C-alpha cells in the first residue's frame, strides 16, 4: 500500500488516491506511510489535527523522521504552540535514532 501511495503521488499525480493508500498503510502501523501522509497533508494544507496525529503516531512507532518533523513543528509553532525545549528534545531523539537531515 505504501508503494501504491508513492506511485499515485509521484507518477500519476493523483494526490487524493495517494493519500488513501498512505492512510491504509498507516492504519497497518507503517510509520513511513504516516510520515508520507502527514507531509502530503501539509502540502495540501490539510487539517492540522490530522497532521499532528500522524506525526505523533510515527514517533510512537520510533520513526526518526517523525521525531525530526515533530521537532520542526514545535520549533515553528505552526500546528502546535511553539516550544523550543520540546523542539530540542525531538531533534535530539531523531539524531540518536539515526536521522540525518539532508
Image: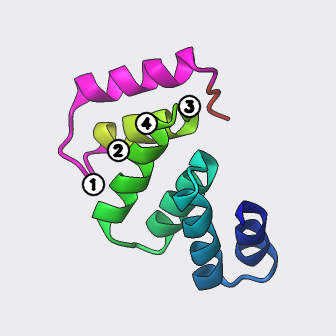
Classify 59 as above or below 97.
below
Q: Are marks 1 and 2 in contact (CB under 8 Å)?
A: yes
The stretch of residues the image draws in magenta is: 76-98
Q: Main secondary structure of the magenta part?
A: helix
Of circles 4 and 3, which is in front?
4
Give the CA distance from mark 2 to mark 3: 14 Å
Q: In the image, residue 22 lies at what x, y percent?
A: 61, 66
Q: Quadrant of residue 21?
A: bottom right
Taking the spot 65% from the left edge, 27% from the top edge, the residue there is 100
Instruction: Give the image quarter of residue 72.
Output: top left
Q: Are marks 4 and 3 in contact (CB under 8 Å)?
A: no
Badge 4: how crowded within 10 Å, few (<14), some, or many (20+)? few
Q: Residue at x 51, y 25 (%)?
A: 94
Earlier in the chain: of badge 1 and badge 2, it is: 2
| Residue nearest the viewer, comparing 48 with 30 | 30
88 within the magenta span: yes
Q: Position of residue 49 (x, y in %)?
A: 28, 62
* Residue found at the very far front of the displayed protein: 28
Disc nearer the start of the sequence (2/3):
3
Looking at the figure, which quarter contains the C terminus?
A: top right
Q: Tell me, for residue 64, which label it has, or none.
A: 3
Give the x, y percent position of residue 1.
72, 66
- Helix, strand or loop for disc 3: helix
The residue where tag 2 is placed is 73
When asked about the image quadrant of residue 84, the answer is top left
The first of marks 1 and 4 along the sequence is: 4
Q: Residue at x 27, y 54 (%)?
A: 79
* The label number, if any, that marks residue 60 in the structure image: 4
Q: Which residue is mark 1?
A: 79
Category of crowding for the residue at label 1, using alpha-carbon neighbours closer than 10 angstroms: few (below 14), some (14–19), many (at least 20): some
CA gap, disc 1 and disc 2: 6 Å
Q: Residue at x 58, y 68 (%)?
A: 24
Amino acid at each position: 500500500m505504501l508503494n501504491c501511495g508513492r506511485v499515485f503521488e509521484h507518477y500519476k499525480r493523483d494526490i487524493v488516491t495517494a493519500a488513501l493508500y498512505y492512510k491504509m498503510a498507516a492504519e497497518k502501523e507503517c510509520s513511513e506511510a504516516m510520515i508520507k501522509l502527514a507531509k502530503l497533508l501539509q502540502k495540501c494544507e490539510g487539517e492540522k489535527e490530522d497532521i499532528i496525529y500522524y506525526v505523533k503516531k510515527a514517533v510512537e512507532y520510533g520513526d526518526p523522521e517523525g521525531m525530526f518533523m515533530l521537532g520542526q513543528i514545535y520549533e515553528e509553532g505552526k500546528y502546535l504552540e511553539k516550544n523550543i525545549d520540546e523542539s530540542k528534545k525531538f531533534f535530539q531523539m531523531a539524531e540518536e535514532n539515526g536521522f540525518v537531515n539532508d
